[in-house]
Image (cartoon, rainbow, N blue to C red):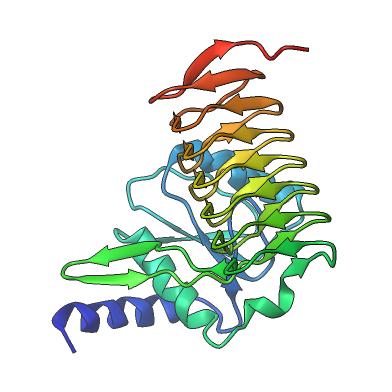
Amino acid sequence: MSDAKVEMAAMLDAFRSEVPSHYSVCSLQSPKNNCVTFIRSEKYIDHLHALVNRGVSNVTVIAPPSLALPAVEGLSYYRSEHVDLLFTLFNNEARRGYDPRAFDRISSSVILDQGAVIGAEGASIAKYKDERVLFRHYGRVVLEENVYIGANAVIQRGRIDDTVIGKGTMISSLCVVGANTIIGQNCTLTIQSGVSGSARIGDRVWLGIGAKVRDYVSICDDAFVGMGSIVTKDITEPGIYAGNPCRFLRPLEK
């Protein structure tokens, strides 16, 4: 075993000694009782305050030592210079042996074409010295009514929360939908288009051939994105968009 692996094991053991053995994992966006989650940036601090309003308690939050965090009832903080790594190690151990496929929700009206892959894991990686650790994905896949998934398309399961494809959405051949992405109703992803993880796509959105959407980007309802476009920023107004980087061209015709 490499020195890095020994150090990672010691890091996890030290954390485990501070956390009850029955704790699982959750995200800040969908918190649960008796869980471990993490925060990297002050822009997510509002999520910590929201836990109280949701009645969630017994949550341990892994956070960087330098981040100023509020005292919130039901929360405790564990400071670490290696937030992503520690959360990855804990996730992989806490949920080892858990089979998320049993909890996927796929409507009986869904059409899966030949070679479609539902529930693949994305390459979410934490690094430590000369070692890399894959964050194992245990979230659900939700495919609502009348969804079509084309040949050799890939729908990744959520890292923690769900990947959701809304009613009537059609995803063509060779498309990829990343982990934790939520796609609304009656959207169309044409051949070889791709959506990176944790994106949010509204209703009636069209992605042209080979269009790409960056991770954590949101697209509003009724946006038409031309073929080969690269969406790097949120689209907040309906209309026709194209280019690299993607930009507004004109309003949609009524």
> In front: 113, or 230?
113
Where is residue 217 drawn, in percent x and y? 52, 36
Among the 4 quarters of the image, the one containing residue 14 = bottom left
> In front: 104, or 187?
187
Q: Is residue 238 above or below residue 99?
A: above
Seen at 46% across and 63% down, the residue is: 122
Where is residue 244 drawn, in percent x and y? 38, 25
> In front: 244, or 115?
115
Seen at 55% across and 84% down, the residue is: 21
Compared across the picture, whether 145 is left or right of 163 comes to right
Residue 109 appears anywhere in the view = yes
Seen at 57% across and 69% down, the residue is: 115
Residue 18 appears anywhere in the view = no
Number of on-image labels: 0
Among the 4 quarters of the image, the one containing residue 144 = bottom right
Q: Is residue 164 above or below residue 123?
A: above
In what quadrant of the picture does the N terminus appear?
Answer: bottom left
In what quadrant of the picture does the C terminus appear?
Answer: top right
Among the 4 quarters of the image, the one containing residue 32 = bottom right
Where is residue 163 drawn, in percent x and y? 64, 57
Where is residue 194 drawn, in percent x and y? 50, 46
Seen at 58% across and 42% down, the residue is: 190
> In front: 27, or 207?
207
Q: Is residue 100 above or below residue 220?
A: below
